[in-house]
Amino acid sequence: MSAPLPRYAVFGHPVAHSLSPRLHALFSAQTGIALEYVAIDAAPADFLHTAHAFFAAGGRGANVTLPHKRAAFALADVHSATAQRLGVANVLTRLDDGRVAADSNDGAAMLADLRARCGGDPHGRNVLLLGAGGAARAAAFALLDARAKTLVIANRTFERAQALAEALARPDRVCLSRWDALDRCAPFDLIVNATSAGVQRAALALPHSLAHAGTIAYDLSYAGAARPFLEWARAARCAYAFDGLGMLVETAADSFLHWHGVRPDADAALRVLAPHRAYGNPD
C-alpha cells in the first residue's frame, strides 16, 4: 500500500465557497508535490476541537479564514513575529515535535496584489479601512507599514474600531469615523473593505462621497462575497475596483512555500481562476 498523502486544510464558517482546495491542487500540479487539501467547516464553538483533532490525526498545515483568525492564534503553541504583533493568524503548521505554529501572511498578500495587479500601492495615499476584525487587523498594520499617508478606520461597532486604533498606536496617521458619520469624510484615494458583510450576504450601504475620480476600491473577499462592495464602487464612480482573489492566491502561494519550500506560480493560478473574479471596474 502507498503511504497516505500529506494532508492540509482550510478552516472557516462558512467555507464551502473557498477556492483554496482548488488553488493547492493547481500548485500541486505545477510543482509535482503530491498532497491532499480539503475545506473543513467548523462553527466557532467547534473550531478548537476540530483543529486539534485535524493535527492529532496527522494534518500538516492549515489556512484559516473567517471567523477563526483570533482563535487560530490562541490555538497555537508557537507564534511568528507577525502573528504575535497582530494577535491573529491565518496559517497553522504542525511542527516535527507536535506543536502547532501560527503565522499571518494576509497583510503581505494584500500588499503584493495591490501593487502588482491593482495600481494601489498605499504609499502616500489617504486610505479608508472598513471593518475591525481579524482580516482588518492584518490589513491595517500592512497599510501603515506601506506608509499610507492617513488611515481612517470605520466599523459598525465603534468600540472594535477604537481597539484596533489603540493596537496600531499611530495617532499621527490613524483616526476613526463612526459608521453613520462616513458621509462627513473627505474622499479617499484607496478604500479597503475588510468587513464580513459580503460573506454574510448583508447590505453595505456607503455614501458615494467617499470616492473621487481616482479612487481605488479593494475588497478582501472575492467572487460573490465581493460583489456588493464592487457594485457600490461602480455606482460611486471609483476609478478602479478589485476583489481579493489575487490576495487569496498570494496567501496560498506563500503558505505553499512555507510548507513545501517551493513557491508556485501565483499568476498562472490566477489566470486559471479568472472566471471566479468579481471585477467591478466602472465603464
Image: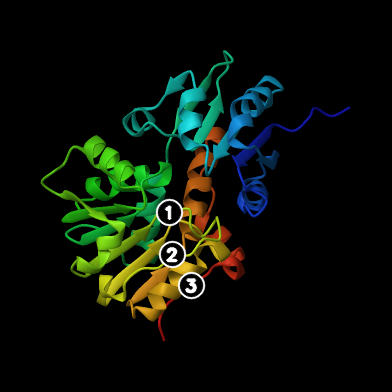
Question: How many numbered marks appear?
Answer: 3
Residue at the image point whose x is 38% and y is 74% from the top: 233
Viewed as shown, does residue 56 lie left or right of 255?
right
- Residues 147 and 177: in front is 177
Q: Look at mark 3 in the image and give the residue it sits on.
A: 279
Say which label, 3 or 1, has the lower sequence index: 1
Q: How is the image coloured?
A: rainbow
Considering every residue shown, the one lying at the far bottom of the view is 283
- What SS does tag 3 mark? loop
Q: Position of residue 161 (x, y in %)?
A: 30, 45
270 sits to left or right of 164: right
The residue sitting at 55% across, 20% down in the picture is 95
**Image coordinates for residue 67, horizontal then vertical, percent:** 52, 41
Residue hosting label 1 = 195
Provide residue 86's location: percent of width, then percent of height. Answer: 34, 34
Kind of residue at badge 3: Tyr
* Residue 236 horizontal side relative to residue 1, left or right: left
Quadrant where the C terminus lies?
Answer: bottom left
Residue 219 or 177: which is nearer the viewer? 177
- State the residue in front, 61 or 242: 242
Left or right of 242, for residue 265 = right
Few, some or many residues within 10 Å of mark 1 (<14, 14–19, 20+): many
**Amino acid type assigned to the residue bearing label 1 in the image:** Thr
Verify CB contact (< 8 Å) between mark 1 and mark 2: yes
For disc 2, the neighbor class at 10 Å (few under 14, some 14 to 19, many from 20) is some
- Identify which residue is drawn at 53% across, 46% down: 252
**Which mark is in front, 1 or 2?**
2
Q: Earlier in the sequence, mark 1 or mark 2?
A: 1
Instruction: Tell me which amino acid carries mark 2.
Output: Leu
Query: In what quadrant of the picture does the N terminus appear?
Result: top right
At a point 23% along the width and 67% down the height, the residue shown is 188
219 up-or-down from 88: above or below: below
